[in-house]
Amino acid sequence: MVYTLDYLIERIKESEKPYDCEKIISAYELADKAHEGVKRSSGEPYITHPVAVACILLELCMDTDTLVAALLHDVVEDTDVPLDTIRKKFGDDVAHLVDGVTKIGQVPLNTKEEQQAENIRKILMAMSKDIRVIIIKLADRLHNMRTIMYRPPEKQRKKALETMNFYAPIAHRLGMYAIKEEMEDISIKILDPYGTKAIEEMLDLHKEQKNTFIDIIKERIRDRISDIEPPPIIEGRVKSVYSIYKKVYIKGKSFDEIYDVYAVRVIVQTVIECYNVLGIVHDIFRPIPYRFKDYIATPKPNRYQSLHTTVIGREGIPFEVQIRTQEMHNTAQYGVAAHWKYKAGISGKVAGEKRFDWIRQLLEQQQDSDDIEQLADAIKVDLAPDDVYVFTPKGDVITLPVGSTVIDFAYAIHTQVGNKMTGAKVGGRMIRFDYELKTGDIVEVITSPGAGPNRNWLDIAKTGEARAKIRSWFKRERREENIAEGMTTLEGELRRNSIVATPEFLLDVAKMQRFDNLDDFYAAIGYGGVILSKIMQRVKDMYNASHAAQVMTDGEEAMTRNIAKKQKSGVIVEGIDNCLIKFSKCCNPLPGDEIVGFITRGYGVSVHKKDCVNVVNSSPADKERWIKVSWAGRGAESDGYNATIDVIGEDRTTLIADVTATIATARFPIRQISAHQLKNRNCNIIVTVEVASVEQLNALIQKIKKISGVISAERTGIV
Ligand code: MN
């Protein structure tokens, strides 16, 4: 491509728009003379560059003054022609544009991340004077990138980094996708030649397959929408190299996982047609769930509108379909520049069209507002609604997500500033920590050397960064406090979930969370490293499982076997469902007895009779551990409970047989029996039987008392 004046004039004539050719030629002549003798790295005369930039802007249908300014854009900076000369010759408008482009060029682009916001801020401020300034600058950079191969390697890298970090994001924010994608593709090839080569090879590998594939898809869609007039435009395309690069190398997806390597675009006339075509596409191909995006109903902040859906063809290959109107398509291609291309005509005057209201307002405001900084803030909010820009008292810019608080701000400045913060001022006034920062706020953090963060900051902070720093402070500085806090929190949570946990069980839970000991586990809960709400379901499952296992292991023991039987309907423990229950051996309570429960350390709740000696004499220290329990309803009576009867009789050899026979006749199972001779030669039989209630037991005792030779028979707690 030879960028000469003739070429430019020819393109202008082809555009059939009323450009002021005389003014353009005159600008060319001034620039040509000023740059005389200077060559580009490519060896071409320098003037080819401004002409190329003007051609790019012509493609965007920018107005005469923009083209004139493009031709002159390097004159003030690189030659000795003063701005005044340009103003006198071409007017204020052009002088403004040239000045703006020159100033943007002078913003030092520090690629350090913390400087990025400030640089973008400066660029946006320049832009706020006239959005055409940034459009010229983007065209300038685009041409420089197209010819970057003539520069030395270290320059290439530097320019590629700048382009990636500043110009492509700005093109994106202005919705100028075509320029953005070209910039990114050139830059990434320089920054990672091997990575991009791999992607290009993959794309090449599939090239033939791809072309047939896209052709078939297009044909199938065209067949079904042939009745739409005028016929929709159907385009097939492959994603930009950089967008694939990002998915493969940054998001770590495999090439097969990238759904939208292939894309088909359908351009129709009306919004209704968009949705009709969507319905037809979903009828022909199977849509992938959750991949449909309606940017028509909810446009992107940069005004991008389109329907996106990803579907699977008969061939099993997923591809993206974008459906939009011609107008949406223009905006998608050219962003804010679409305004000049399709609406404004050549004068550059901004029409009162609604969707460009924001630009119009900016340009209007700019005339009666001296406060450019304020204006820049307004644009920033409009372009990046996800971020707020706030300032330190020294004027440094801190970028934070919307909703951020001074806590996020303080930690964004420095970890120690966050940790030692005791208060904060916005615009000189003290504010609460939960105050939501707004763009333009000047925030002053008050610190004190001995201070430390508060636990509730974890709930107030919005950024993950601040929360991580707060947690790590607690982790380091407050171990004892964390352990105590963690223990209390865990106990409360266990109680809420009716879990009566043993130390062994807690250790199992801790190990499940990869802690060797309980203190570390408690400490982690304390500083927020372990979020209980996230693990409680697993703890409950573990508890239920271990509980079931316990019942089975101890099944041989009568005392415990009863527990299994009674679990559901025997005893109701107030406030706790389904807990491990044991009947105390000291008093062997039976249904009908007045009972209380005692929370044991490690064996659930043990149930005692209210008048049990252990209840009456229990230590005041254990007062908290006694809880109300009661017998469940009548249904429980069919289940058996162990009761022990102490029988004393004359030493008759048949007494044991008589007692067991009586019990067996009454159909009560005998669980245990022992007998021994007392000093007075009487016999003592202690027998444990299974009964359903106190009434049954009393009836049995009456029967035993009637056996000949029996002196006494009574219920006892001692086995
Ligand atoms: Mn230039």
Image (cartoon, rainbow, N blue to C red):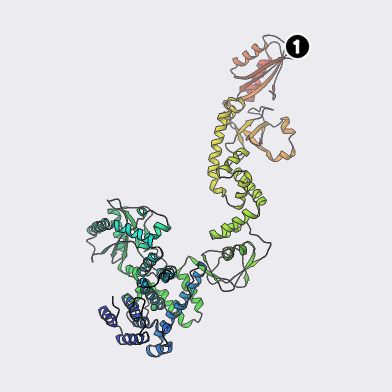
Residue that label 1 marks: 681
Q: On screen, 392 above or below 582? A: below
The quadrant where ligand 1 appears is bottom left
Residue located at (43% from left, 89% from top): 84
Residue 295 at x, y percent in the picture: 38, 63
Residue 494 at x, y percent in the picture: 60, 43
Residue located at (64% from left, 27% from top): 590
Amino acid at dot 1: Arg
Residue 576 at x, y percent in the picture: 60, 39
Residue located at (62% from left, 44% from top): 518
Looking at the image, the residue that sits furthest to the top is 653
Quadrant of the frame with the N terminus: bottom left
Q: On screen, 554 above or below 396? A: above
Q: Nearer the viewer, residue 360 or 66?
A: 66
Q: On screen, 304 above or below 599? A: below
Let me know if residue 320 appears in the view. Answer: no
Q: Is ligand 1 closer than 8 angstroms to the Cβ of mark 1? A: no
Element at badge 1? loop
Residue 138 at x, y percent in the picture: 39, 74
Quadrant of the frame with the C terminus: top right
Apparent side of residue 559 relative to residue 370 in the rendered image (left or right): right
In which quadrant of the rendered view does residue 259 lie?
bottom left
